[in-house]
Image (spheres, rainbow, N blue to C red):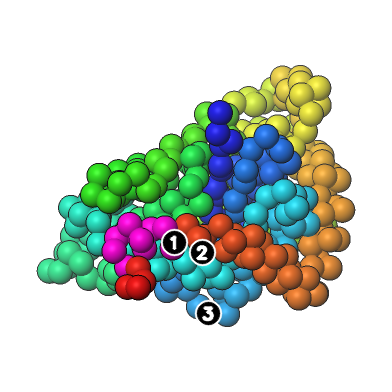
């Protein structure tokens, strides 16, 4: 039986926060240690261009995110950890795939449709106002990311499932035209992945500016946790654990036994200030060592660069001959 190949894309926008850690970084790092499977993790810096990010922010975000994954224990000896822009085969494959991608398929992309809808609701006469080809063609680049390494399993959230399905459609159409060249991937959506709420009770998101940076210093971490919105119940009053931001975050970091104990405290009554202090201590204890490594890597970015280039070499050792095969299939080949 062929070995499963997992591929995970990491968006290079903003500073990683605890929601990223619980939802993607922690499970990704654990998976990287599974020697029975292959794993690819890439920093999707080309994708960030679709959002017109500031160049300095893209560079800084790439450094912070890569340093965080490394500090938290990503196994780069087994897994392949690379920067998308270090693999020139990927943009070349993107153009090749564009030739086999129906415009109608791109018209159905959620991100494009949402942008069009926003224009229409804003009473713009042009539904495509402000929409770049980078945003419109985003799913083709993602298909190239996936297909380049013969990925079989793509861990994604429900909102990203469509991109994997589009990659399958594009690969299937290519295979029908040129022969069995690409492996058809499948999305892996975990039902038990935690989605944490932010400081204001909404989903933790950079766009809401309600995040808790993952590896912030102790003073900042405590200050932000103390700002988490709570209700006005008195300390002695029983409290609900369901749909409670503090409890949900605590549950993502504590052991089963610890969670049960705190759930009991909720029914008996617990002061929000005490719960926030406990949450701070729990998160800080887990991340303290990783924070030290993270700060060391931020201070020595050449160490991060070395890891990314090491991963890029591993990735290109696979991508270069595979792209040669793809070019052969479409007729771009030596004449003699």
Identify the residue position indicated by label 2 in the image.
320
Query: Tag 2, which secondary structure?
Result: helix
Q: Which mark is residue 245?
A: none
Residue 327 lies in the magenta stretch: yes
Identify the residue position indicated by label 3 in the image.
55
Q: CA distance from mark 3 to mark 1?
A: 29 Å
Res 267 quadrant in image: top right
Residue 296 x/y as whole percent: 84, 68
Query: Tag 1, which secondary structure?
Result: helix
Residue 2 x/y as whole percent: 55, 34
Residue at position x 59%, y 51% in the image: 40
Identify the residue position indicated by label 1 in the image.
323
Q: Earlier in the sequence, mark 3 or mark 1?
A: 3
Q: Is residue 13 left or right of residue 301?
A: left
Q: CA distance from mark 2 to mark 1?
A: 5 Å
Residue at position x 44%, y 71% in the image: 49
Res 228 seen here? no
Res 304 seen here? yes
Which of the two discs, 3 and 2, sits closer to the camera? 2
Q: Quadrant of the N terminus?
A: top right
- What segment is highlighted magenta in the picture? 324-332
Residue 287 lies in the magenta stretch: no
Marks 1 and 2: in contact by CB < 8 Å? yes
Q: Nearer the viewer, residue 110 or 328?
A: 328
């Amino acid at each position: 039986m062929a070995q499963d190949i997992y591929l995970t894309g990491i968006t290079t926008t903003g500073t990683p926060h605890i929601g990223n850690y619980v939802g993607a970084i922690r499970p990704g790092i654990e998976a990287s240690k599974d020697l029975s499977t292959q794993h690819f993790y890439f920093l999707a810096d080309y994708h960030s261009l679709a959002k017109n990010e500031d160049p300095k922010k893209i560079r800084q975000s790439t450094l912070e995110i890569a340093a965080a994954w490394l500090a938290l224990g990503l196994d780069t000896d087994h897994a392949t950890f690379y920067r998308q822009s270090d693999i020139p085969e990927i943009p070349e494959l993107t153009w090749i795939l564009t030739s086999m991608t129906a415009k109608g398929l791109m018209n159905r992309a959620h991100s494009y449709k949402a942008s069009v809808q926003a224009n229409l609701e804003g009473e713009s006469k042009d539904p495509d106002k402000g929409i770049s080809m980078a945003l419109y063609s985003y799913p083709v680049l993602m298909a190239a990311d996936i297909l380049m390494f013969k990925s079989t399993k793509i861990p994604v959230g429900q909102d990203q499932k469509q991109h994997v399905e589009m990659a399958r459609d594009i690969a299937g159409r290519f295979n029908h035209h040129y022969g069995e060249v690409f492996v058809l991937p499948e999305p892996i959506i975990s039902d038990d992945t935690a989605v944490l709420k932010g400081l204001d009770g909404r989903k933790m998101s950079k766009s809401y500016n309600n995040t808790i940076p993952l590896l912030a210093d102790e003073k900042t971490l405590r200050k932000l946790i103390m700002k988490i919105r709570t209700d006005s119940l008195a300390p002695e009053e029983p409290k609900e654990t369901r749909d409670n931001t503090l409890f949900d975050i605590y549950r993502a970091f504590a052991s089963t036994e610890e969670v049960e104990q705190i759930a009991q405290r909720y029914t008996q009554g617990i002061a929000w200030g005490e719960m926030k202090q406990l949450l701070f201590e729990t998160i800080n204890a887990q991340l303290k060592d990783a924070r030290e490594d993270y700060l060391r890597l931020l201070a020595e970015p050449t160490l991060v660069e070395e890891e990314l280039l090491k991963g890029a070499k591993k990735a290109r050792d696979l991508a270069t001959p595979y792209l040669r095969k793809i070019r052969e299939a479409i007729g771009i080949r030596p004449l003699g």
